[in-house]
Every structure is written in structure tokens, then in C-alpha cells.
Image: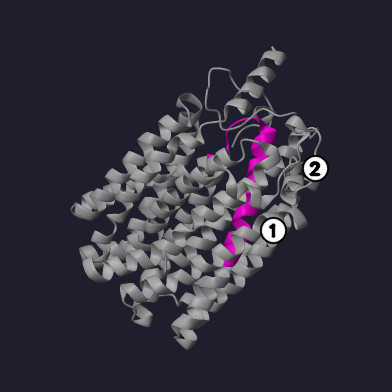
Amino acid sequence: MDSVESIRPRLPPTRSSERAVPVTQQPTLSTERLLAARNAVFIIFAMNGMAFATWASRIPDVKQTLGLSAGQLGTTLLALSAGSIVGLPASGWISHRIGAAGSVALGLGSTAVGATVIGVGVDVVGERWLVALGLFLLGLGVGVWDVGMNLEGASVERLLGRNIMPRFHAAFSGGTVVSALIGALMAWQQVPLTVHLLAAVVVIVAVCLWAARSFLPRALESGGDADAASGAEDPAVSGGRARLGVLSAWTERRTLMIGVLTLVAAFTEGTANDWVSVAFVEGYGLPTWAGVLAFATFLSFMTLGRVAGTGLLDRFGRVAVLRVMLVVAGIGSLLVVFGTVPLAYLGAAIWGVGVSLGFPVGMSAAADEPERAAARISVVATIGYTAFIAGPPLLGLLGDHFGILRALLAVGALLVVALLVLPAVREPEHVRAQDEAAVAAAE
């Protein structure tokens, strides 16, 4: 954590041509209040990661308990994706109506109910359709929660005047690591899924409701995004034109290309989340706890990549750093598929580092212009989470024919697509010009 003194808003250096955080006029806010909001965002991201990984860490047990094939598991996981896709497009409007804290609370409620239904569906009823219903509610909640916390994170990042979004996502990854390790312990001790999920829900709900009280005031959290989401007019916008609504962001070429990048990043990350533990168990003949350990390895190094990546982005820019990272992710996935057991664990670590920055950088790029941040974050997140619709059934079907381990080769093919659209994350020229003018005026 930074000291109180170090988080005061400041102008960035002029040498960076691809800064993630544009300079804007900073609203009046005490340092202590901004510090509290920043820490609250860290906590909410971490709890979101814990909520997801609590489920993901027990996927091998669910597969074995219900006697599912790889294809059946993939189809069941589709319900999680469907829930997210339903929640994400509406999340911009929801955040505008009830604020980021309200969005997090609403998503948290759906997540808690979904996790409970999953546990009952596996341990009590033993029916796949009930598990799918729980996954839908879980995905719906996580989708609304995700956009709410990313919008709050973008607002805090803007007020700080420096790049911090990857560290918020590192908190998410840190939450998944802790939760995955707990999940490995639960699987080793053969703790019933219902007990595990309910205990996690109680802790996560309590912590999130406490932390969300420190979110930014509604007047500051959007930075003008609420008006953009509702389509309100603002004569101060260049040319006196009206700010466009959420739907208009779907027609912006740059926004869509950033969405494609986040889709590939989400697919690459999500593939590991859903299938790495299963791939190690079935591909290498390891026990379930060893598969979960591989999942934890991936998550641990993804967290480290997000912590260290902030400095790399500040020094070398988004495009250069992501180009190297995507290639590294591809190498790691190949080691998982073709290596020995030790090399596969090394590959999981390299894969985690390589995929670490794609999604957070996509969110920062979508928020380059504060007045359009809410609409663009909603669009980019929706496109990115579409990977969770295509990913699980695709990998499941490929796994039925070639084995889950070989199915992971799909990751490398999509990384090529990400490299092609990578220039879209570069900061727009007119935003860069405004930033340079602000720095010149300050000097």
C-alpha cells in the first residue's frame, strides 16, 4: 500500500506516450477520504476474486460427484457465462441509477444466492439443472458486481492521477489465490461443497458490505459518466455536441477493438480458471488437490504480473508491454500442454504472468475519456465476458475429442488475434494532446 502522502493527485511525466490515466481537473477530496476509497476498491476486487475462485476451485469435485463428461461440464458452465452476459449490458444503467456501491451490493446478493443453490444442487439434490441455475445467478451477480467495481476503480484511478488499475486486478487475483488454496484444502479434507460455499458466502458478504461504505460519493465516483450513460447533453464537450448514450459505444471502432483484446484476455484467463485443474488431473493423472495446486500456481503468478506490471506500463507503454506479455502467455500454455509435470507447472506460472495485464489494461483504455468511461467499460466488459460463453463449451467439446490437455491449444490461436488489435489500447491523440497541454500549463 502507498502512504497517505503518495496518493495525492499529481500530473504524470511528459515522456510517456501511452499513459493509461488521462489528466483531468481533480475534484476537491481529502487525502484520507481518497485513501479510504482506494482501499475499499482493493477489498471489493479481492472479495470478487474469492467469490469466483471458491466455485472454480471445486470444479473437479463437482465433475466427479455428478459424473459429468468434459462436454457435459462445459455445457453446464455455459450457464455461468449466460448469467454474466445478461448482467453486463445492463450494468452501466444500473451503476447510473444506484451507484457503484449499490451495484456491488446487488451483484453480491445474486452471487450469494447462486453459490447456495450450487451447493444444494451438488450435495443435496444431485441434479445438473439446479447447478446450472445456481451458476446463472452466480454469473449474473458477478457481472453486475464486476462493472460496478471497475467503474469505481476507474474513478479512483482518475482522481489519483496515475496508473493503478492493474493493482486493483492484482487484488482480484490475490483473492483468487487465497480462495484456490482454501479450495485445495477443502478438497483434500473432502469437505462438502455446500459447507464450503456457505462459509465463504458469509465472510464475503460481510466484508463487502463493510468496505463499500467507503466508496466515493456519488457526485465524484462517475466523473461525468452518469451523464454519458443517460445520454444527457453537456455543452462543454468538444463542439458542444451531446454526450452519447451507452448504445452508441457499440458503434465505436476503437472501443470494439479494445473489446476484442479483452475477449482474448478473458478467454485465455478463463480457460485456465475453468480447465487447468481438470487438465492436470486428467491429462497427467494427478489427484484433484494437485490439479487445484496448478490452478493456484497460475493465479499466484498472474497476481505477481499485475503487481509488477504497473511499473512496466509506466515505463514502456501499453502496446509494447502487452505484445511481450501475450507471447509469454502463449509459451506458457504450450508448456502446460506438451511438457512433463514439472514443466507443466512452470508453464502454468508463465501463462499466469503473460495473461496478467490484458483485462485491466483494456479497462483503463476504455476509460481514457472520463465522460465516456461508463458506457465504454460496459461495452468492453460485455465483449470480454463473451469469452466465458464460447470458452467452456468449446473447450469441453474439444476435450471430448482430443482430451482437455490438447484442447488448451485453442489459447495460442486466439492470442494471434489479440496481437493484431493491440494498437487500439494506445491513448487517443486528442486525449494525449490535452494531457500534454495540462502538463505544460502546470509547468
How packed is label 2: few (under 14 Cα within 10 Å), some, or many (20 or more)?
some
Horizontal side, residue 325 vs residue 337: left or right: right
Q: Nearer the viewer, residue 153 or 367?
A: 367
Mark 1: give few (<14), some (14-19) or many (20+) Cα within 10 Å.
Answer: many
- How far across and how far down the image is residue 319, in percent? 44, 32
Instruction: Indicate which disc residue 211 carries.
Output: none
Q: Position of residue 50 (x, y in %)?
A: 52, 59
Q: Is residue 257 left or right of residue 286?
A: right
> Is 54 one of the magenta-colored residues?
no
How many marks on residues?
2
Q: Amino acid at mark 2?
A: Glu
Type of amino acid under label 1: Ser
- The stretch in magenta equals 140-166
Identity of the residue drawn at 50% across and 36% down: 425
Please say whether residue 90 is visible from this viewpoint: yes
Say whether residue 200 is visible: no
Q: Nearer the viewer, mark 1 or mark 2?
A: 2
Direction bottom: furthest residue = 125
Residue placed under numbered mark 2 in the picture? 233
Q: How is the image coloured?
A: one colour
C-alpha distance separating marks 1 and 2 = 24 Å
For the C terminus, the image quarter is top right
What SS does tag 2 mark? loop
